[in-house]
Amino acid sequence: MTDTTPAYTGPERVFSGIQPTGNLHLGNYLGALKKFVDLQEAGHDCIFSVVNMHAITLPVGREALLDQTRQIAAAFLACGIDPDKSIIFAQSAVPAHAELAWVFNCVARMGWVERMTQFKDKAGKDSERASVGLFTYPVLQAADILAYKATHVPVGEDQKQHLELSRDIADRFNREYDAPGFFPLPEPMIKGPGARIMSLKDGTKKMSKSDPSDLSRINLVDTSDEISKKIKKAKTDLEGDMPSEVEGLKGRPEVENLVGIYSALSGESVEAVLRQFGGQGFGVFKPALADVTVAHLAPITARYREILADPAGIDRALAKGAEKARAIAAPIMDEVRDIIGFWRG
């Protein structure tokens, strides 16, 4: 049976957010920030948020939250996101996120949310003591996206399930309230090098801020010497030299990860990297990888430190972005209230 439901016909818009929880690392940069800049420079209508409302699903102190929110905003700016081309703002500065999340809590179904694997991973065996916010986290994510009628979301593989939920919620709202095509069904944007950067100590685990070993990740605030040291100590394997072809990376996750990092930072294909270094030892490849990484990150790190030294400037950029974000979300929320039948007085 053919679905004749009218499709969304509004403008294309990209939305994504990063939670303010500690220092950003190379995985955040290659998996998200660099892609954000690429999307901006390709001419997309982009909205990027520091999703600080998501941060309080777990305990966090007031000053830490404020400081980490500024850190993420500074990283956006340092990596090349231009507030004159894209919108950068703190989630909490736009009331539409919270209001639409409540509407979506009433549209989403318990079974849908219970299937979300990230809640199980974060709550662990003590799920009954987890906050309700942690459980409904992906519903707020749907509100983040659809408050702006975003059509595309750059996401990692671990967030793809949440985006599917956003699509389900948008579709159910459109059908339940007889508003065909009102909300778009947002599409994922996952492709491209560096989509999933793994730990320098374990190629089977994603690079993470929460890993107890600082040697597992390259932080955006690391010095050139620290970067070189971490790459030198990065785990490889006992199989010998670098492979010459992609097929040779199978079963060698640490090597595959390092080659992927080189490819993403240099702009060369994985095949080209392997042609250059195939058959050579890691004593040749690792110093070359360190040089590429330092050359790419050093200007960003310098700019990042400079921006962090001016918190008032960060606040001005966030305020400017929030004003633009509210201007987009407010009329959408007016329509949502009218569709539902909320009394507005």
Image: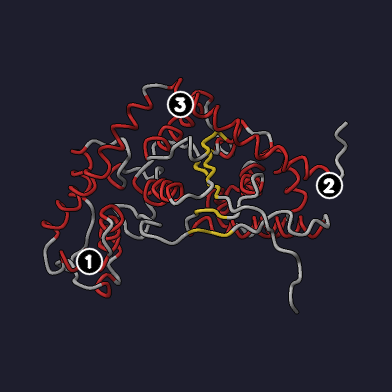
Dot 1 or dot 2: first in sequence order is 1
Residue at image location 27% in from the left, 37% down from the top:
299
Q: Which mark is residue 340?
A: 2
Q: Which mark is residue 314?
A: 3
Which percent across, then down, holds residue 337? 81, 42
Pick whichever, 29 or 111, lies toward us.
29
Which percent across, then down, holds residue 13? 58, 50
Residue at image location 48% in from the left, 35% down from the top:
84
- Hey, which residue is sitting farthest bottom in the picture? 1
Q: Which mark is residue 13?
A: none
Which percent across, then down, holds residue 40? 46, 47
Measured along the vertical axis of the image, is residue 174 above or below residue 242? above
Residue at image location 31% in from the left, 56% down from the top:
264
In contact (CB < 8 Å): disc 1 and disc 2 = no
Dot 2 or dot 3: first in sequence order is 3
Measured along the vertical axis of the image, is residue 320 above or below residue 299? above
Q: Which residue is mark 1?
A: 272
Label 3 neighbour load within 10 Å: few <14, some 14-19, many 20+: many
Which of the image's four quarters has the C terminus?
Answer: top right
Label 2 neighbour load within 10 Å: few <14, some 14-19, many 20+: some
